[in-house]
Image (tube, rainbow, N blue to C red):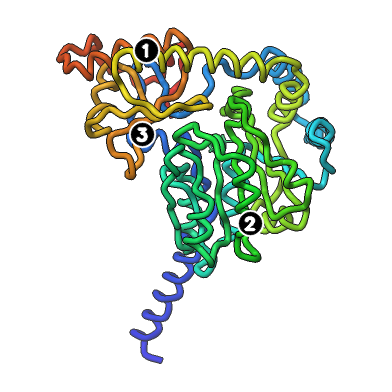
Amino acid sequence: MSDGNAILKGTRRTFLQLSAAATAAMAFRVVTEADLAAEDRNVYHPGAIVIDANENPLGPCDAARKAIVDMAPQGGRYSYWLKEEFVKTFTQMEGIKPEYLRVFPGSSEPLHFTVLAYTSPTRSYVTADPGYEAGMRAAKITGARVVKTPLTKTYSHDVKAMAAAAPDAGIFYVCTPNNPTGTMTPHSDIEQLLAIKPKGSIVLVDEAYIHFSDGVSAIDLVKADQDVIVLRTFSKIYGMAGIRCGMAIGRPDLLAKLETYSGWSAMPITAVAAATASLKHEHLVSDRKQSNAATRQKTFDWLASQGYAYVPSQSNCFMLDAKRPAKEVIDAMAARNVYIGRPWPIWPTHVRITVGLPQEMEAFQVAFQAVMKGSTTTGFVPSLNRRRLYSDGQSWPSV
Ligand code: PLP
C-alpha cells in the first residue's frame, strides 16, 4: 500500500469515526422548549417581562420548595427509594401499575427517546401544524419523514388527515392542549386515531399542559393496553421547569424500547422529592388552573376590546395574530423589554404568548398596543449588564 493510500484510508477512518461520533452526539442532543425559545433571542435586560417559553412564573409550590431544601443535606446519597416513592404516589393516584411509568428529568427526554425508538427512514413522524417542534428535530436524527398536518378549523389535530397522510407512520404525535395554540384534541379523536392507525405505529400523547385545561387525559387508553405513550411534565402547572421532572406512561413493552436510548435512570433527589410533594398538594392544580384561566381571560377580553385576533386557548399560552410579520413584532416588543414567543412558519403573522402574572400581562398590553399603534418611543434603554433579570425581581447569572 502506498503512503498516499494509507493516509487516505486513515483519513477516511478518522472521518467515519468522527461522523459516527457526531451522529451519536446528535442522538443525545435533546431539544427543549428553552432551546427553541432562546434560538432567536440574546439576553434579557433588567426588569424584562419574559413570556416567551411557556414557563410558570410562580415556580414550585411551598411544599415542593420545602422538600428541596429538606433534601439538600442528603444530596450526597443516591437515595433511590425517593424515586420509588414518587412512582408509588403517581401510579396509585392514577390507578396504574408501577411498571407502566418511567421517570425522567423532564418530558423532553422521553419525547426524544420515543422518536428515536419508533421512527426511522421507513417509519414517519406525524404531527400537527402548527405543533411543538422538539419531536420533529428528533425525527431528523433518525432520518424519518416528518409529516405535518394542519390543525382543523376548530384547531384540534386532524386525526383522519394524519392517518391518511402516513400509512408508513411510526409515531402520531398528539399534543393536547397543543403547543403553541393551547387548543384541545378530544379524547374521542385520539380513540379514533388508534382505531385507524397503521399496525406497529404508536400514538404519543403529550399532556404537558393538560392541567390547565378541562381535557380528559389519555391515561385510560394506557390502562386499556392500547398503543399509546402519554408524556407528562412538572415544568408547567407545577412550576418546576428548572428543577426537571417528567414521565412517560405506557405499556411496559412500549416503554422498554426507550431504554436503548435513555441510559442510567437516576433522578436528582430534589426533583423527585419536589414532584412528590407537588402531587400530594391538595389544591395546587385547581388553584393554578383557576388563576391562569382568569389572567388568560382578562388578556383575551382586552385583546377583543381592541380588535386584535387570537386563538382561544385552554392552556398557559395562545397564538396572537398581529397581522404583520411576526419577527417585526417580536423585535419591537423586545425593544420594549417584553419577550414574547416565536412564530410558526405556517402562521407567519402569529406570535405565541405565554400567560404570565397579571402584572406581566398588563405590561404586555401596554407594549403590544404601542407596537401596533406604531409608537417610536420604546420607553426602555437597554442595559449593558449581561445578566438575566426577570420581572419577578430574581436575577440569574447569564450562562
Ligand atoms: N412537550 C411540550 C408540548 C412542551 O411544550 C414542553 C416544554 O415546553 C415539553 C414537552 C418538555 O418540557 P420539559 O422537558 O421541561 O418537561
Residue type at mark 1 is Trp
Measured in 3D between alpha carbons, the distance from the residue under mark 3 to the one under mark 2, in whole angstroms, is: 29 Å
Observer-side mark, 3 or 1, equals 1
Q: Residue at x 62, y 61 (%)?
A: 201
Along the line of sight, the residue nearer the viewer: 10 or 368:
368
Q: Earlier in the sequence, mark 3 or mark 1?
A: 1
The answer to whether marks 3 and 2 mark residues whose Cβ atoms lie closer than 8 Å is no
Query: In the structure shown, which secondary structural element does the residue marked by tag 2 occupy?
Result: strand
Farthest residue, direction bottom: 1
Q: Quadrant of residue 5?
A: bottom left
Q: Earlier in the sequence, mark 3 or mark 2?
A: 2
Tell me where residue 335 appears, x and y as whole percent: 25, 20
Residue type at mark 2 is Ile
Tell me where residue 10 appears, x and y as whole percent: 43, 77
Q: Quadrant of residue 291?
A: top right
Residue 202 - label: 2
Q: Residue at x 46, y 9 (%)?
A: 358
Observer-side mark, 3 or 2, equals 2
Q: Earlier in the sequence, mark 2 or mark 1?
A: 2
Whether residue 25 appears in this view of the structure is: no
Q: In the drawing, does residue 305 fall left or right of residue 100?
A: left
Query: In the structure shown, which secondary structural element does the residue marked by tag 3 occupy?
Result: loop
Measured in 3D between alpha carbons, the distance from the residue under mark 3 to the one under mark 1, in whole angstroms, is: 21 Å
Instruction: Confirm or reject: label 3 Cβ below 8 Å from ligand 1.
Output: no
Badge 1 is on which residue? Answer: 302
Observer-side mark, 2 or 1, equals 1
Tell me where residue 280 appears, x and y as whole percent: 78, 21
Residue 342 - label: 3
Q: In the drawing, does residue 236 fall left or right of residue 310?
A: right
Tell me where residue 50 appears, x and y as whole percent: 41, 20
Residue type at mark 3 is Arg
